[in-house]
Each structure stands twice: as C-alpha cells, then as structure tokens.
Amino acid sequence: MITLTETAVKELKRVVAEQGREDMALRVFVSPGGCSGMNYGMAFEDVHQAGDQVIEQDGVTVWVDEMSIMHLAGSEIDYVDQLMGGGFSIHNPNAVKSCACGHSFDTGHDSETARACS
C-alpha cells in the first residue's frame, strides 16, 4: 500500500482542478537506471492499465503497475514546496540507499543497473 501526505493530496487536487480533468490520476512507477539502480517516476494519466494497483485517498487516485508496487510497497508520497527544487517526493522504506538527488534508489538488489551520476 502507498499513502499520501495531506500536503500531497492537496497539491494533487489543485493540479487536477487546474487542468479541469477529473479523470486524471497520478501514475507512480520505478524503472531501472540512475546512480543507485532504480529511478522513481511520476506522470499524470487518464488511462488505467490492466494490472494496476489503484490507490484512492481523500478524493485523489494513484495508479501503480505490478512491477513498481513491489519496490514501492509501504511508501509515502509527499509534496514539498521549496524555493529551489520543490515537488513530489517518495519516502520508501524498501530503499537501503539512495542518491543525493533523491530520484534514484536501491532496494539491495538493484546495484547492477546503477550508472554514474551525471
């Protein structure tokens, strides 16, 4: 299960309302790569894929594919509003290490796909 902070829910509602698209959901995923082995990714989508786990919390929807949920189970999505570099972030209890950039992580089995930071 993935949860969202109150701040993340508020920001997701704001973005969906701004777009005027009540059918949009936040897709959260991981992909091989990055300097720690796996990258986090997020995108707004309006098409649900077969096999997606659907998380609904306080009126917002998050979709996570079957492969990604294995790496993200128990994670919390937050939104941080900072002058330099604010945005959504993932607090992942499965990550045993992560890159300083915060976009790449390793669950202990991902180091073979790691690349040098650029």
Image: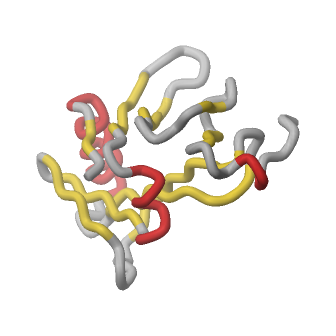
Q: What x and y, as percent, mark residue 84?
A: 60, 17
Q: Residue at x 55, y 34 (%)?
A: 96
Instruction: Locate residue 107: give its quadrant.
Output: top right
Query: Furthest residue to the top?
Result: 83
In the rendered view, tell whether residue 100 sits above or below residue 18: above
Q: What x and y, as percent, mark residue 91?
A: 42, 33
In the rendered view, tell whether residue 62 sits above or below residue 66: above
Q: Quadrant of the C terminus?
A: top right
Q: Residue at x 84, y 46 (%)?
A: 115
Q: What x and y, as percent, mark residue 83?
A: 54, 15
Total of numbered circles in the picture? 0
Residue 24 located left or right of residue 45: left
Query: Furthest residue to the left?
Result: 58
Query: Furthest residue to the bottom?
Result: 50
In the rendered view, tell whether residue 69 sits above or below residue 110: below
Q: What x and y, as percent, mark residue 3?
A: 25, 43
Pick the front one: 58 or 105: 105
Residue 94 located left or right of residue 108: left
Q: Residue at x 18, y 57 (%)?
A: 56
Pick the front one: 117 or 13: 117
